[in-house]
Image (spheres, rainbow, N blue to C red):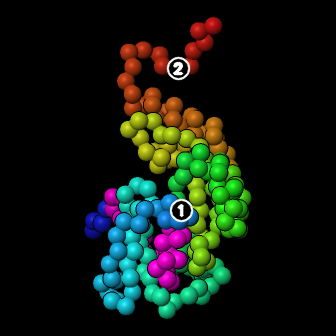
């Protein structure tokens, strides 16, 4: 038996309502360029809108002008999507409360997640959206996942409850020491003063 190895998220497709509501939210609020449109090839009565969330991958929306909001919040039953999280820069994150407030969009306020900061709010159809900002940049040649797995290893070795900035800093140091060559025989901490 062999795996079907994934190599990243290709796209996410959501069931939307009207075309303009989708464009106004995904591009007009979240800044995702509206890059492509065609009929839903499985249901010609629906439109299919494509948005770029910032990494060239796609968020797509099936639209139908006869549909309207059904739930105040989308179901959280097993098998349902709880929320979608999108990466934002620190500069954007620091402006999120103000920019949501100027639109009158209710939100959670900033949440400290130890390794990132988050804020939550709902799209016009009730889907929970998270804007997330990492508290670290991975070393060159590493991914956020590389840092997270190393930080997790350090956290569990130390018996700590959750990942904190000390685990991230130590994980980054560990990754660099294992991946980057040095002419020094001793790469340990030193005090030149």
Residue 8, magenta (yes or no): yes
Label 1 sits on a secondary structure element that is loop
Q: Can see residue 1? A: yes
Is residue 83 placed above or below 7 in the rendered structure?
Answer: below
Q: Residue at x 39, y 70 (%)?
A: 50
Residue neighbourhood size for the residue with mark 1, other residues' Cα within 10 Å, grouped as few (<14), some (14–19), many (≥20)? some
As rendered, which of 126 and 22 lies closer to the eye? 22
Label 2: state its secondary structure.
Answer: loop
Horizontal side, residue 69 vs residue 7: left or right:
right
Position in image of residue 114 (x %, y %): 65, 48
- Residue 15 vs 185, above or below: the answer is below
Residue 138 included in the magenta stretch of the image: no
Against 49, residue 143 (above or below) is: above
Asked if residue 149 lies left or right of residue 46, the reply is right
**What is the magenta range?**
6-26
For the point 53% across and 37% down, the residue is 171
Q: Which residue is mark 1?
A: 30
Q: Is residue 149 left or right of residue 179?
A: right
Q: In x, y percent, where is residue 143?
A: 43, 45
The residue positioned 59% from the left and 62% from the top of the image is: 130
Q: Earlier in the sequence, mark 2 or mark 1?
A: 1
Query: Residue 70: x percent and y percent?
Result: 59, 88
Mark number displayed over residue 161: none
Residue topped by disc 2: 188
- 170 with respect to 34 (left or right): right
Cα distance, mark 2 to mark 1? 44 Å
Neighbours of disc 2 within 10 Å: few (<14), some (14-19), many (20+): few
Do the residues bearing badges 2 and 1 touch, measured as CB atoms within 8 Å?
Answer: no
């Amino acid at each position: 038996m062999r795996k079907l190895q994934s190599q990243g998220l290709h796209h996410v497709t959501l069931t939307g309502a009207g075309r303009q509501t989708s464009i106004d939210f995904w591009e007009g609020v979240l800044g995702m360029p509206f890059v492509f449109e065609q009929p839903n090839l499985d249901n010609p009565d629906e439109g299919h809108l494509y948005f770029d969330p910032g990494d060239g991958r796609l968020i797509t929306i099936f639209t139908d002008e006869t549909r309207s909001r059904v739930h105040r919040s989308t179901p959280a039953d097993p098998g349902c999507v709880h929320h979608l999280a999108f990466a934002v820069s620190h500069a954007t994150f620091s402006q999120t409360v103000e920019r949501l407030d100027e639109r009158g969009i209710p939100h959670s306020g900033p949440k400290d997640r130890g390794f990132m900061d988050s804020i939550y709010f709902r799209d016009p159809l009730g889907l929970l959206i998270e804007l997330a900002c990492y508290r670290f940049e991975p070393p060159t040649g590493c991914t956020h996942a590389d840092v997270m797995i190393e930080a997790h290893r350090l956290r569990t070795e130390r018996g700590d409850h959750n990942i904190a900035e000390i685990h991230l800093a130590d994980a980054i140091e560990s990754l660099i020491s294992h991946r980057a060559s040095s002419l020094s025989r001793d790469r340990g901490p030193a005090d030149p003063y």
